[in-house]
Image: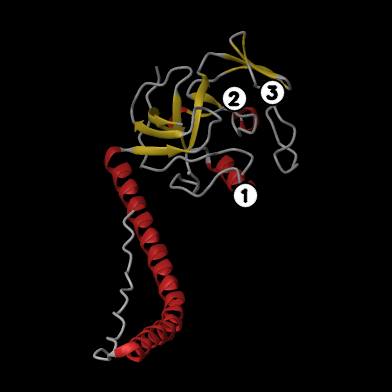
Amino acid sequence: MQAVSQWGRASVVGQDKGNGSLRPVAYDFLRPLPAFSEGHSGSHGVIVTRTAQTASATGTAPRLARRNPSGTFGRSVRRIANAALLTLIALAVCVGLGSLFNLRITLTDSSAPAGVYRLVAGAPVRRGTLVAACLPQMIAREGLTRGYLRRGDCPAGAEPVAKLTGALPGDIVKVEPDSVVVNSVSFPHSRTAGRDSIGRPLRHVSWGARQVSGGEVWLFGFNDRRSWDSRYFGPVPLTTIRGSLKPILTW
């Protein structure tokens, strides 16, 4: 078991080479139609009264039609504004809860299902543990330049990566074009890509077997062939691991 250094808090998002209401309605009440003349007698009076009703209804309709477009537009604008406000509130709540309970959101499935995870700092690191790690600065800068990483609070200004610890000190790692083998166990879907998703050549570690040095770890993400991991940038110091990630909700 290896001790894990404690860094600050940071969100964890995808690190792949392919680069996660109340709607008040204003009601437009119609004003009552003007009162019609009454008191006429005889058939002529009835005709006059009906004529007045018809004329009044005909004269009111255009006014209603003229009001409705602006009223509908106003309601739409208010609904959009309210939806945007509620979205901002929801995001603020999520950020606050994440900071309070040390929750992280990962949008990649290269190492584990996408979802919400809790960062456990100081937990022992074993082979196969899902961890959050800050890559060494030179590697992180390459990831930022190529768009494999987003901005974050790691020392190089990049986000931490979420990867599985595939090999620990003393393990034998063999990397070949078609597979990665650790201690004679071959990992499925571990072929090393020659180019990234937009056709750029990918630098990778030298082919062959080597023993993991003390204080180092190999990080992998074999669930997605686009994962940018130790097949390409090699081992990283164990001290770069912030902690293990425990799933809260996955999808």
Q: Which residue is mark 2?
A: 222
Q: Tell me the crowding category of disc 1: few under 14, some 14 to 19, or many 20 or more residues within 10 angstroms, Cα based.
A: few
Please tell me which residue is depicted at 32% across the width and 69% down the height of the picture: 26
Can you name the residue that lies furthest to the top here? 184
> Is any atom of residue 240 visible in this view?
no
Locate the N terminus and report the quarter of the image it occupies: top left
Mark 3 surroundings: few (<14), some (14-19) or many (≥20) residues within 10 A: some
Q: Quadrant of residue 67?
A: bottom left
In this rendering, the answer to whether 79 lies above or below 218 is below
Task: Please state the horizontal and vertical placement of residue 215, each as a whole percent of the image.
Answer: 47, 24
When asked about the image quadrant of residue 116, the answer is top left
Q: Secondary structure at mark 1?
A: helix
Who's the residue at 56% across and 27% down the image? Answer: 221
Percent x, y of residue 23: 34, 59
The correct choice, above or below, for 146 with respect to 63 in the image is above
Colour scheme shown: secondary structure
Q: Residues within 10 Å of mark 2 (few under 14, many from 20)?
A: many
Q: Which mark is residue 191?
A: 3
Query: What whole-number distance in Å separates the C-alpha atoms at marks 2 and 3?
Result: 9 Å
